[in-house]
Image: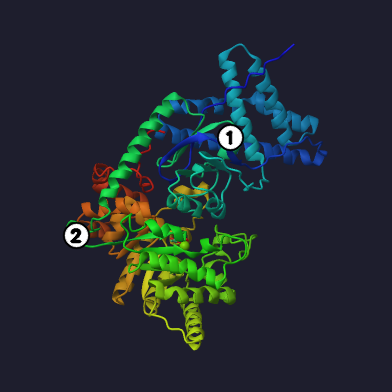
Amino acid sequence: MTTSTKKPIRPRTVLVGVAASPGYAMGPIQAIANRSITISEEKLPRERLAHEEQLFLKALNNTIREITSLKVATVERLGINEARIFDAHLMILKDPTLVNSILDRVKKESMNARWAVHSKIKELIAEFEKSKSELMRERAMDLRDLYNRLLAALDDSGPVIENLTMTSGTVIVAHELSPSTLISLKKEEVIGFATDSGGRTSHISILARSMQIPAVSGLRNVSVLIEPGDTILINGTGGMVIINPNDEDIRHYEEKLAVFIKQKQELFTMRQLEPMTRDGKYVTLHANIELPLEADNVLDFGASGIGLYRSEFLFFRKGTPTCEEQAEAYGYILRTLKPYPVIIRTLDAGGDKLVSDISATDEANPFMGWRSIRVCLDRKDLFKEQLKALLLASKEGNLRIMFPMISGLNELRAAKALFQECRHELTEQGLEFPEIKIGAMIEVPAAVMMVDAIAKEVDFFSIGTNDLIQFTLAVDRTNELIANMFEPHHPAILNMIDRIVTAAHREGIIVSVCGEMSSDPLSTLVLVGLDVDELSMTPWSIMECKKIIRSINYEDVRATAKAVLKLDDAQSVNRYLRQKYLQTITDLGISSFITSQDFGSDLGDP
Ligand code: PEP
Ligand code: MG
């Protein structure tokens, strides 16, 4: 006798997260870097039972909260009908019979919470799947979804598996991805990715934009909801994924993708045009790059230099690169861009960019920990090697150097002294170097308070808004739970930028903004109005930024900047900017940009 086992139909699941990198992708999930959740039965001693009950109730409440917020987001973005699925989920979760029977297994049978959830829900799924009623079989799908969510909420372990074997056309779904993992993947193999964790300015998101891979982060539990064999649709522009999309979703996706590709092609007609406002104010546009090879294309994207090369990406390998290897990489970028300027930022390891041979891995607050210039000043051997490599490469082009995460004069002076020491040691050997401009990143609030003094000791400023916002607003840039609090238009941030620009211009030095804020359309307008001289961004945002700059009047955005500096909160600023400029930006057909918080543009469909 043969038995046929029919594969259950997998549920269509819509998840809303953070728009990490624009674009659309759809494909099978061929590689899953999933958190492994182990479920085994434990017989617990009596004194542990109350604790286990609490664990379950907490997980239940968290899951209800999560689904409720998902429902709200889905109503806003897709409409009430699409959100109905979540009503069914909430009804099941609030069903006292189900909840009590799980609690009974803990209380009366001394089961651990995870096993109680697993055994009860699996029993129900099996029962519903056998049912002749289609409605009951649909409930089984809902239960499978809830099973994963509840177990994820109960899971406190979760090593992330990062050794991926790839085939082409892969959509990666992971709890968390590190920048070093992403750069080790071949671009042609990865067409998109979705992660549970992360925010818009996590380095994994920044890297995805550089690599032009559509991505959604901050999805919270996508990695436990998928199964091998699922298809996933990534909407990186709107910040949404659909697991197992239906025909309607796929039709929408194809339409959106076609428009996206057309708009991108049209943008290339902009690359030779000057980034100048209608009343003649020129704004320098530079590119941010993470890999030396990216230098090949930045001029094609319309940049007139590199405003930030994140040199730490060179260190994502086994063993730190030697001075010669570094000099070769820096020299390559400088030669490729010559005579245009290239700002190379010294090592900014740590935070969410752990370099295996250097970084500490067990810090409680890695972004505020042993990171960046702090590492360099502690590990002078390493820092001097990099500074010497920069000096050795300097004759290859127009090099500028900047130090990250400067929090005061001591650090700046120490870094500059080490640079002079390196220069001296090399000139002793008979080598000669051109003058090299030295800049400081202003990304720590303490540096803003000291900005007048710092301006006297550097040749330029570059504002790292990603860190400046995270530190000023006390909002971890990688934490998806507070992604909506990461507000570039918070008046505290705008007033800080104003203060930095004023101090810089008083000393006759140039100010650039190299954080992600510079490539957001509404922020671009404000930054031009605040008199920032240069904007540096992901190469392929440059043409859109040009389009915006060419459509505005400097005098007008100057008045706008003055007005928004006086507003009370980010929402008021966003409202003001939307009222004034939303139509202009919509008319320009800017769609691949990821829009400002609360901007509410292209979020309508998958
Ligand atoms: C920033 O903080 O804004 C910045 C540009 O640097 P990074 O994102 O690498 O920290
Ligand atoms: Mg930074």
Within-10-Å neighbours for mark 2: few <14, some 14–19, many 20+: some
Q: Determine whether 145 is above or below 22 in the image.
A: above
Q: Quadrant of the C terminus?
A: top left
Where is ligand 1, by quadrant?
Answer: bottom left
| C-beta proximity under 8 Å, tags 2 and 1 | no
**Nearer to me, 531 or 449:** 531
Within-10-Å neighbours for mark 1: few <14, some 14–19, many 20+: many
Picture quadrant where residue 384 is located: bottom right
Q: Determine whether 518 is above or below 20 in the image.
A: below
* Distance from Cα at disc 2 to Cα at disc 1: 51 Å
Of badges 2 and 1, the one in the foreground is 1
Q: Which mark identifies residue 555?
A: 2
Q: Quadrant of the N terminus?
A: top right
Q: Which of the two discs, 2 and 1, labels the residue nearer the N terminus?
A: 1
Q: Determine whether 279 is above or below 253 in the image.
A: below
The residue tagged with tag 1: helix, strand or loop?
helix
Q: Position of residue 318 (x, y in %)?
A: 62, 61
Q: Position of residue 172 (x, y in %)?
A: 54, 42
Kind of residue sitting beneath label 1: Leu
**Nearer to me, 4 or 603:** 4
Q: For the point 28% across and 44% down, which residue is it?
A: 266
* Dot 2 beta carbon under 8 Å from ligand 1: no
Is residue 50 visible in this depiction of the protein? yes
Kind of residue sitting beneath label 2: Glu
Is residue 472 visible in this depiction of the protein? no
**In this picture, residue 59 sits left or right of residue 373:** right
Name the image colouring. Answer: rainbow
Residue pointed to by mark 1:
225
Picture quadrant where residue 277 is located: bottom left
The residue tagged with tag 2: helix, strand or loop?
helix
Q: For the point 64% across and 60% down, which residue is it?
A: 361
Q: Position of residue 310 (x, y in %)?
A: 47, 63
